[in-house]
Each structure stands twice: as structure tokens, then as C-alpha cells.
Image (tube, rainbow, N blue to C red):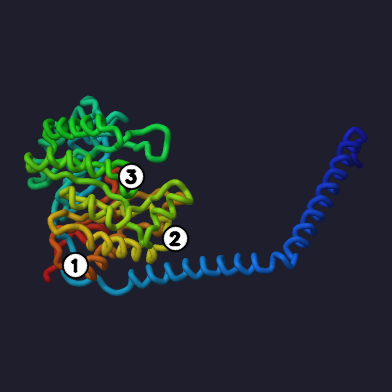
Amino acid sequence: MVKPHIAKPLAKGRASLRRLRTALRRLRMAFLRRWRHPRLRWPKRIMAAFVGCLVLAVLAAGISLRLLYAGDPGPGTQTRGRDAVWLGHAWVDARKGEAELQGLVRRVRGTGIRDLYVHAGPLEHDGTLPKERYPKVGWLLKAVHRELPGVRVQAWLGDVLDTEGPTGLSLADGDNHARIVGSARQVLDAGFDGVHFDLEPLHSEDRAYLALLDALHALTRPRHVPLSVAAHQIDPLPALHSVAGFLTGHPKWWSQSYFGQVARRVDQIAVMSYDTSMPMESLYGGYVAQQTELALEVTPPTTDLLMGLPGYHTNNFGRHAWAETVPAAVRGARLGLGREDRRRERFGVALYVDYAATDDDWAAYRDGWGRREAD
């Protein structure tokens, strides 16, 4: 039996629930009456046609990517000795020492890795770089050059741009350009073998970025050191960056022509070919194959083109770790290279990132790409 002091509130709650159900029923009936109105016949047909076209487009895109992942990589589509790996900040701020270095040496030695992108930033929002951010750079440079002769240590510099938020580094400010060039000069004077920039989110057709690259190349060229950049992916469909920018405010992709303009201004360009939202490994591999072909079409033969390998394992809306794998990326890059320009020498892959990559990731790189195959 329900206690008296509970019965009255319970009855009120049941009455409120009945009223809510009645209101929802009436709302549903009103919606159905409007939905069935003759005036909505054509709008409903147009909506159904639009949804049908959207579903067909998605299916067609999926089939296309799956077909791009089919077949066997051609002979000779393996390392040219121009690969790279991104390394975290712990290598220059005293958190890593000789023991960790020997582990890195074991992984790199005997592979095609020529460049280490060591995080020495981030830059301040005005383009400057405090020297105290890389106190152990001298030890690292000396140790790498001793243990891995021929391997270059590039300073990885980056920052969040103000393109999609109220704060960040503004490339439209000419004074910032001068300070960024000064930061590049600073790390080169400290002994780094090159400078690698990763500025995000960087929108397609940004002329200020091209002007910055011209200024940076004027610094690096006389020193005979590489100017390297991390690049956004290329539109997999024509003008997709414009559509994405209009709908979400985040263009994500670059146009193919803009990618080519960037590639012509640097010595090395590494495509961040991950965070694709692909739900299956075969679709992701096909996507990497497509990106490889698109990038090869517009990258001059004098510029090193590297395709990124996802050596990290987070899961979110933009990335599914079960789909974006190092084996799929390696296979996709090999397929794209074989179809577009199998004999191109200035080509490689870049593993992101050392502190998240597993033994399996490194093995997939070495076994799938890291050993040269005779033509």
C-alpha cells in the first residue's frame, strides 16, 4: 500500500504524465496532417530526391576509394631514403636522455628515415620563440649526429593560427612574419639542420602564408638547409574546401593548385594524411592512395613529397584508429606512387608521432616501406 504522504504527489505525477502523453499525441497528429497536405507533395519529392542523391554520392565515393585500394603495389615502390618521423618536445627539454636515445637509434637505423622533426616550439602568438623551450638541443644534435650519421635534425615549429578563433598567430601581420623568420634563424643558429613548420588551421588560398614561405626560403637557401612544412590534405572532390568552409567554417582541405603553390616554395612537404573520419581500413587506404596521386601531380620534382603515417591511436569523430592504420597508409602511398610516378626519387613517408607509435607501427613502416626493393 502506498503511504498517504506519498499518494498525493504520486497521483499528481501520473496526471502530469497523462497530460504530456496527450500533448505529444496531438502534436504528432498535427504534424502528420501537415505532412500529408497536398501542397507538400513536391517539396517531399524534392527532399527525397536530394537524400537519394546524397546516399548515392556517398556510396559512389566509398566504391571509388575501395577500388583505389585494390591491386598490388608495383615494384620499386619502397623507400628512397627520404623518410621522416615527428618527435615530441621531450627530446629537447631534458625529459629524455641517453637510454631513450638508444631506443630511437635502434628503430631508425637501417630504415629510410633521413629527417627527425623535433618539436622545439610552440611559437608565441607574435611569432617569437623563447630560447628556454629547447635547453637540451646541443646534447640531442651531438648524439644524433654521432649515432645516426646522415640523419638531419629539423626544428619543428608551429602554432595555432587565428583563422578560426579569436586568438592565435596572425599571418596577416607583417611584423609577425619578421618575427617568425627571426625564430627560424634562431633555431638554425642553435645548430638545427633545418626547420619544419606546422601552422594550423591554414586555409586554402592564404596568400600571406605564401609570402611567409618566400621570406623563410630566402633565409634557408643560402645556408643550404631544408625548409619543410606540414601540409593539409588536398580536395578529394573539386572545391570541397569551399563547401566545407561555407557549411562548417573549417575548410580542412586545400585546393590542389594551392598545394602546388606551397610545394614550389619549400624543399620538403609532408601531407598530414590522417584524421580523415574514414570508417574502414580499406577506405582509408584508398583515400591515402588518392591523396598521393593528387599531391604527386602538382609537387615539382625538386621538392621532397612525404605522406604522413598515423602512428597514434586516439578515437574521435575525425579519426577511427581501427581504420587509420600505418599498414593501410603505407599500402595506399605505394599504390598511389606506383600509378602516378613510380620512379620519382624525391618521395617518402613520415611517421606521426614517436611518443604514440607502437612497435607494430614501426614494424609496419619497416616491413611495408622501409626497405628498398630492386626494380
Quadrant in the rendering for residue 64: bottom left
Amino acid carrying label 2: it is Pro
Q: Could you say where residue 54 lies in the image, as x and y percent from the top left?
A: 51, 66
Q: Nearer the viewer, residue 303 or 188?
A: 303
The answer to whether residue 232 is above or below residue 170 is below
The answer to whether residue 171 is above or below residue 266 is above
Q: Mark 1, residues whose alpha carbon is within 10 Å: few (<14), some, or many (≥20)?
A: some
Q: Circle 1 — which element?
A: loop
Cα–Cα gap, marks 2 and 3: 25 Å
Amino acid carrying label 3: it is Leu
Among the two numbered marks 1 and 3 on one chain, the one whose residue lies closer to the N terminus: 3
Quadrant in the rendering for residue 180: top left
Amino acid carrying label 1: it is Asp
Q: Circle 2 — which element?
A: loop
Quadrant (top left/top right/bottom left/bottom right) for the C terminus: bottom left
Q: Nearer the viewer, mark 2 or mark 3?
A: 3
